[in-house]
Image (cartoon, grey):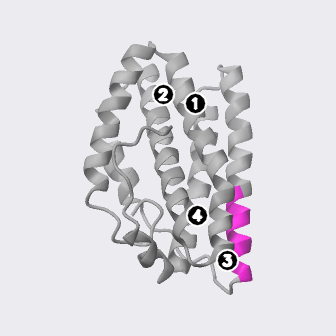
Amino acid sequence: MLGLKSDTDVSWVKIVEDNLQQLLTDHAFAEQKAAAAAVSLIINYSEETEFVQALSDHAIEEMGHFKMVHELMIERGYQLGQDQKSEYAKHLSKFFPKTKDRQQSLINRLLMASMIEARSCERFSVLSKNLKDKELAKFFEGLLASEAGHYSLFLGFARIFMDREIVDKKWDDFLTYEADYMIQQGKSPLVHG
């Protein structure tokens, strides 16, 4: 369904199990960044009423996910800790050439958001199926549908705002770019690490 061109090796789960607080901190901040990105898109494309309505709901849902992760951390005696820069997001952004074209910038942002959501969904699926901690496995399983929905939301809007054939070609190239990067990952307890 997600169309990703690489899969996370199950060995990554052991790294996560040895560093749950770091994973949950990274996850919490990722949810905050997703909400902030949605708000930024609303601000910059406020004339697109349907888009604004969808992203308003999305931002609220992402902050709800942040709250869920944070409450889980508190229950386990963890503190939120400090945010770390996302090397994954930094690498993804290099795929897109700098542009002053407003429409192209929107498409790039939508494709990037879609990719991040797709990989989050894939990673949460791996965790839900392989974590020994069944409570945490169930927690990640509970997020799968919404992450898949977020992936579809962003990709769907990209296809509305620009010719689908152009978007799909760029998306396919982006999937290859992301897969090449992810082959080297799976060594850190980060959602996209």
Task: Evaluate if marks 2 and 1 touch, with contact meaning CB atoms under 8 Å apart.
Answer: yes
Q: Residue at x 35, y 46 (%)?
A: 92
* Circle 2 residue: 106
What number is the disc on residue 73? 3
Indicate which disc residue 44 carries.
Answer: 1
Residue type at the position of mark 1: Asn
Mark 1 lies on a secondary structure that is helix
Which residue was labeled with disc 4?
A: 128
Query: 10 Å neighbourhood of mark 3: few (<14), some, or many (≥20)?
Result: some
Tell me which numbered mark, 3 or 2, is placed earlier along the sequence. 3
Q: Is residue 177 above or below residue 71?
A: above
Q: CA distance from mark 3 to mark 1?
A: 33 Å
Q: Nearer the viewer, residue 174 or 140?
A: 140
| Image side of residue 1 versus residue 49, left or right | left
Q: Name the amino acid, label 4.
A: Ser
Lateral position of residue 101 relative to residue 78, left or right? left
The residues bearing labels 4 and 3 have C-alpha atoms spaced at a distance of: 17 Å
Q: Which residues are magenta?
A: 65-75
The quarter of the displayed image where residue 101 is located: top left
User: Can you give x and y, in whole percent of width and height, for residue 186 in the image?
Assistant: 35, 66
Query: Is the residue under label 4 in contact with that under label 2 (CB below 8 Å)?
Result: no
